[in-house]
Image: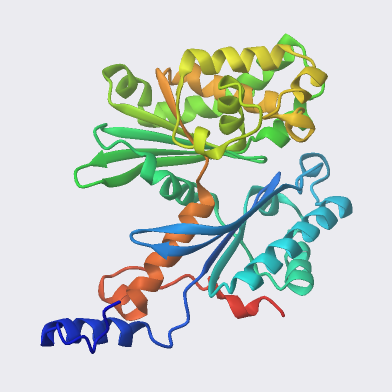
Amino acid sequence: MATSEDPHWGKEDRRRYRSKHRSTRGRRPQIFGALDLGTNNCRLLVAKPQGSSFRVIDSFSRIVRLGEGVSLSGKLSDDAMERTVEALRICADKMRRAGVTHMRCVATEVCRKAGNSIEFVDRVKSDCGIELDIITTAEEAALAADGCEPLIDYRNRHALVFDIGGGSTELVWLGLGGKRKSEVLGWMSIPVGVVTLTERHGGMTLSGAAYADMIADVAVHVDKFEAEHGIAEHIRSGRVQMIGTSGTVTTLAGVHFGLERYNRRRVDGAWLNARAMLDVCRRLASSDYETRVQEPCIGVERADLVVSGCAIVEAMHSRWPVKTLRVADRGLREGLLLGMMQRTNRGPQSSAANGAAAPLKEETEGTKIRL
């Protein structure tokens, strides 16, 4: 192995070698943690930079149902908070073991709605050492779109990204330009997700009329977004890409592909024919609870919620009938990671010089996780 003392090296070789090793010697490796706490799920990614992207070194996902009953009571229940705190302790331990140096932990719709969310956030900080940031609907939509950016085909003129959550559904309408540039032309947070829709209409057993009512509930909001942006006309003229990121969409893909167990590599980035997608939606909507439980990519944890997700998908497709949907097993967490890495690489002085926003104050150092 050559070293800087190799007699065959010239002066320029030695200079490059010493410059490279002087820049990394003694530096603490940068490890990033991104946590997304939603109405239904708690998800964590731990990653380190790799080129213009990152490499995941640890992850965690658990259905905690934090929003269970919130649409009826207006508050987080004691049982739901206990389940969630337990999952967050695992996340804190994973970030601590990985040596996370930068993290951002966000909460979404359920914590925006619940009357006792501030008390819950305080408890998470006290019990887990994690500072949760309750983000706005605008930031949630933007982060989801940022996380899906690698799946955008820039030969199109527009992209429509949707993220079906437990308490809300985010829509982002993008204009696409050359050199892989995109512009947010519009966004909407629909105050309906798989948990809220299930609590309103049921999920264990569901009649055809109840399923139609679910679709109608969502269609009211979809129609408002369509009226503002005229997306359907762009779809008819071609060159619009639709990307779906959510447990619903990845589940539909897994069922369609007949996977015996969920496989992210098979699902993330896959193209799903719209006709096949709708066939799966209608089959699941008309099946009984036990049949849905037996589907390997659904199981008992999703069997009561998946029909609501199907209704949301159908409501969007009825207004925006694309021929294919690109499936994304990525989104908000990836958007968080990319944002943190970009801000860290620029540094505060560079950010200010370019007129960009300074690093968000909610982005915390890994040492804030108690040892």
Residue 302 lies, with reference to residue 99, above or below; the image says above
Residue 237 lies, with reference to residue 9, above or below; the image says above
Task: From the viewer's perspective, tell me whether residue 167 is left or right of residue 275.
Answer: right
Task: From the viewer's perspective, tell me whether residue 159 is left or right of residue 178.
Answer: right
Res 206 → quadrant: top right
The N terminus - image quarter: bottom left
The C terminus - image quarter: bottom right
Residue 348 lies, with reference to residue 147, above or below; the image says below
> Residue 151: x percent and y percent?
38, 40
> Residue 318: x percent and y percent?
49, 16
Residue 168 lies, with reference to residue 350, above or below; the image says above
Which residue is pictured at 45% across the width and 49% down the height?
147
- In the picture as drawn, the residue positioned furthest to the right comes out as 78
Which residue is pictured at 52% across the width and 50% down the height?
332
Res 131 → quadrant: bottom right
Which residue is pictured at 43% across the width and 17% down the height?
321
> Residue 213: x percent and y percent?
68, 17
Q: Nearer the viewer, residue 58 or 355?
A: 58
Q: Nearer the viewer, residue 276 or 178?
A: 276
Say whether residue 139 is visible. no
Task: From the viewer's perspective, tell me whether residue 285 is left or right of residue 243.
Answer: right
Tell me, what colour scheme is on the image?
A: rainbow
Q: Nearer the viewer, residue 237 or 90?
A: 90
Task: From the viewer's perspective, tell me whether residue 253 is left or right of residue 66.
Answer: left
Q: How many marks?
A: 0
Say whether residue 102 is visible. yes
